[in-house]
Image (cartoon, rainbow, N blue to C red):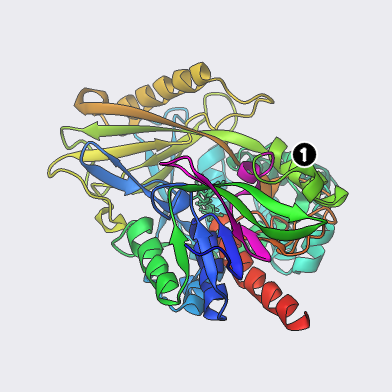
Amino acid sequence: MKENYDAIVVGGGIGGLITAGLLAKRGLKTLIVEKAPAVAGTCRAIEWGGFRADMIGKVQTAYFAKPEDTWLYRAFEKVGVTPDLGIVERHIMSIGRKGQVKPEFSLFDTGAGSDALIDLHSIMTGFELNPKQKTELERVLNEMGTISEETCKEFLDMGFKEWSEKNVGDIVIQMFFLGTTLLAGLDASDFAAGHMMGAMGPIHKGSFCFALPRGALMEDGLIAPLAKAVEQLGCETITNTTVKKIIIEDKNVEGVWIIDNNTMLSYQVKAPIVVCAVPIYHAFGRFLEEKDFTESELRFVNMIMNGQQEDYWGVYFLKEKVVPDDFPAWSHVFDFRTGGPVYLGDLWIPLGASQWLGATGPKGKQIVVMYMVGGSEGHFEEDYPSYKTLTEQTSQFESIIDSEILPGFLKAVEHRGHLLMPGWGRFSYLTHDPNDTLEVKSKAVKGLYFAGDTPYVLGSLLGLERCGRAGIECADAIARDLERS
Ligand SMILES: Cc1cc2nc3c(=O)[nH]c(=O)nc-3n(C[C@H](O)[C@H](O)[C@H](O)COP(=O)(O)OP(=O)(O)OC[C@H]3O[C@@H](n4cnc5c(N)ncnc54)[C@H](O)[C@@H]3O)c2cc1C
């Protein structure tokens, strides 16, 4: 490590790696500082009892029909890596409907456009729409399907409930739309109308894909080739080192204070440019303070801090093979006993039907991940659920799995582990004034930039897509600023 760099990137997650790679490609002497023992951030793999699986169970989600059209793919190509991303079929499974003994599987074909949504509605509610209701649904979806990004932005500070009461003629169709916001774990009033329209529109047009690196975990299929390319471009990476402070004098960035996590020795590293590629809720109050933001940026940061939730996983190793080979790799699990389509969580089976996801484990054994059970997507209370509530909900979920989805599941469990992931949010869905945002370039401090999944919350991009877009646009903004100075 040197004493001076042209640019320092805080955080070696996918967002930091992309941004650092693009800066190094432009000839900037760049350093990534990562506090964990290795890069990857949230895209790392979990290893447990001989099993290895993706830490974020979710696939890369994008509002495009082909992986090649995604921001993430474009960002990788710019760094010099061609990712081998394949489309994953999306399965929706409903359980517990009255009179339904066996679970019902339905392929949510993302390419089928709004037809798939209408099917999903029938599965969730158990009744078919009449022709008048279908016409109204199609009218609203068509409207959403042709809406521009600019129009979406105009509706970002309006709750979706308010919007649908004004714009949707039929009460059943209103309920349909409000029900879909529950899938994201939020009350329809807190769900930005602009975001909903921006998300529903592409689904309606059939341009929506879920992609994963083919036959590999995210860490192996995406992060490893990306980190290699970043290194080949001349970027240095230092791990096991935490940024304690971004040094800011008279509203100008001067470098960072870092601490070696092994020796606890502290160093100052100088650079006129620092990119915060750490989700803002992990950076704010730690190495960035209130005074480092404008009032408008602060309103945005506070909105995100308030939107944080907790995610919860249960990981199970099964000594016997109870998951059939044709079981969908991924199922959303709903519970209809409460009267509405309440989302309980995801059931994810990295082994069994979904070998191609790349998870590995001892032969003949299976791993089952129950994901977000009672976490942000599974509860609709104002307060975050307590650990006790989460474990109670998990037991409930387990007995549903055992009795209705995978008979013999509980008996086959060899190991049961839990992971609580506090502090991450579905903040992209929250309503806020579109003028209050955090852009890739700080408005308060010269030389400070943001990448990773915090910028571009406005609009309908999901986390990894935001990382791709922010990486490209952050590196472009830095290059423009350097040309000017
Ligand atoms: C449970 C879960 C499910 C998700 N599902 C999806 C999905 O389906 N689709 C999708 O698109 N996105 C999804 N996401 C979001 C996606 O994972 C993130 O958007 C993306 O991984 C964020 O990357 P990042 O580089 O911004 O941050 P991170 O991956 O969080 O990386 C930040 C890095 O900074 C390091 N760091 C933190 N503080 C410091 C410090 N002080 N000094 C040095 N280093 C530091 C951390 O160790 C970490 O390595 C999900 C996220 C979670 C948590």
Tell me where residue 287 sits by quadrant: top right
Residue 348 in the image: state x and y as whole percent: 36, 43
- The residue depicted at 46 percent of the width and 66 percent of the height is 236
Position of residue 371 relative to residue 215, above or below, is above
Residue placed at 24% from the left, 42% from the top? Answer: 51
Q: Sort mark 1 into few (<14), some (14-19) or many (20+) by Cα contacts within 10 Å.
A: some
Q: Nearer the viewer, residue 59 or 234?
A: 234
Q: Quadrant of residue 455?
A: bottom right
Residue 208 appears at what percent x and percent y?
A: 54, 64
Left or right of 234 in this view: 385: right
Indicate the quadrant containing the C terminus: top left, top right, bottom left or bottom right: bottom right
Query: Residue sitting at 73 percent across and 83 percent down?
Result: 483
Numbered range of the magenta stretch: 259-285
Q: Position of residue 314 (x, y in %)?
A: 38, 31
Q: From what the image shows, is residue 199 above or below residue 401?
A: below
Determine the image quadrant of residue 213: bottom left
Residue furthest bottom as drawn:
483
* Residue occupying image coordinates x 17% and y 37%: 321
Number of callouts in the render? Answer: 1
**Residue at disc 1, secondary structure:** helix
> Is 283 covered by the magenta stretch?
yes
Q: Is residue 263 toward the left or the right of residue 24 in the image?
A: left
In screen coordinates, is 282 left or right of 415?
right
Task: Check disc 1 and give the amino acid type.
Answer: Ser
Q: Relative to the observer, which residue lies in front, 403 or 86?
A: 86
Q: Is residue 162 a member of the stretch shown in magenta?
A: no
Q: Report the residue marked by disc 1.
A: 189
**Residue 66, visible in the rendered structure:** no
